[in-house]
Image (cartoon, rainbow, N blue to C red):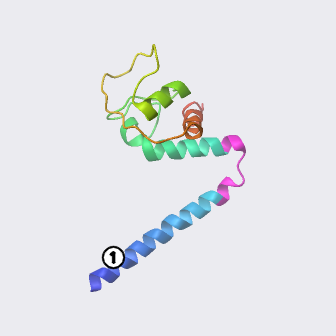
């Protein structure tokens, strides 16, 4: 019985922390320009979905995936949505490990914006 209360308390604390973090992030985004919001969304998508394989720093190769700094929309969409490459593109690696993600064009554009920031 005591373990259930501890687990429930930990879950509630974790839920509170995640909720508070999202509220704070949303408050901060209200003060951002549209371009800054786009970059913020792109960075969030990269960290959440790409950095584990490609690297925290998109300019560096990762353990599984190559550096993707500077990638364009066509390449990102082909790799993310269909797991393919655009016509005429020569892959940096021959592996076919890329996980497909259900991202829409707007999300891919934000990822492209983040990957193309100086």
Q: Decide if residue 70 is on the left or right side of residue 91.
A: right
Q: How many marks?
A: 1
Q: Taking 83 as reference, is 45 above or below it? A: below
- Provide the residue designation for mark 1: 7
Residue drawn where x is 34% and y is 23% of the image? 93
Q: Quadrant of residue 4?
A: bottom left
Q: Quadrant of residue 13?
A: bottom left
Q: Main secondary structure of the magenta part?
A: helix
Residue drawn where x is 60% and y is 58% of the image? 25
Q: Is residue 72 visible?
A: no
Question: Residue placed farthest to the top in the image?
Answer: 88
The answer to whether residue 53 is magenta is no
The magenta segment = 27-36
Residue 102: x and y, percent?
46, 42
Q: Taking 9 as reference, is 76 above or below it? A: above
Residue drawn where x is 45% and y is 13% of the image? 88
The answer to whether residue 29 is magenta is yes
Residue 33: x and y, percent?
72, 45
Q: Secondary structure at mark 1?
A: helix
Q: Is residue 42 visible?
A: yes
For the residue carrying disc 1, how many other residues have a C-alpha within 10 Å: few (<14), some (14-19), or many (20+)?
few
Q: Taking 102 as reference, is 17 above or below it? A: below
Q: Nearer the viewer, residue 42 or 102?
A: 102
Residue 47: x and y, percent?
47, 45
Residue 34: x and y, percent?
71, 43
């Amino acid at each position: 019985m005591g373990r259930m209360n501890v687990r429930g308390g930990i879950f509630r604390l974790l839920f509170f922390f995640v909720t508070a973090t999202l509220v704070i992030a949303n408050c901060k985004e209200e003060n951002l320009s549209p371009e800054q919001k786009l970059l913020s969304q792109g960075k969030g998508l990269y960290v959440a979905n790409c950095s584990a394989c490609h690297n925290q720093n998109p300019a560096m190769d990762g353990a599984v995936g190559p550096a993707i700094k500077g990638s364009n929309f066509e390449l990102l969409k082909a790799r993310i949505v269909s797991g393919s490459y655009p016509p005429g593109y020569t892959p940096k690696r021959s592996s076919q490990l890329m996980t497909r993600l259900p991202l829409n064009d707007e999300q891919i554009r934000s990822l492209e914006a983040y990957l193309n920031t100086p």
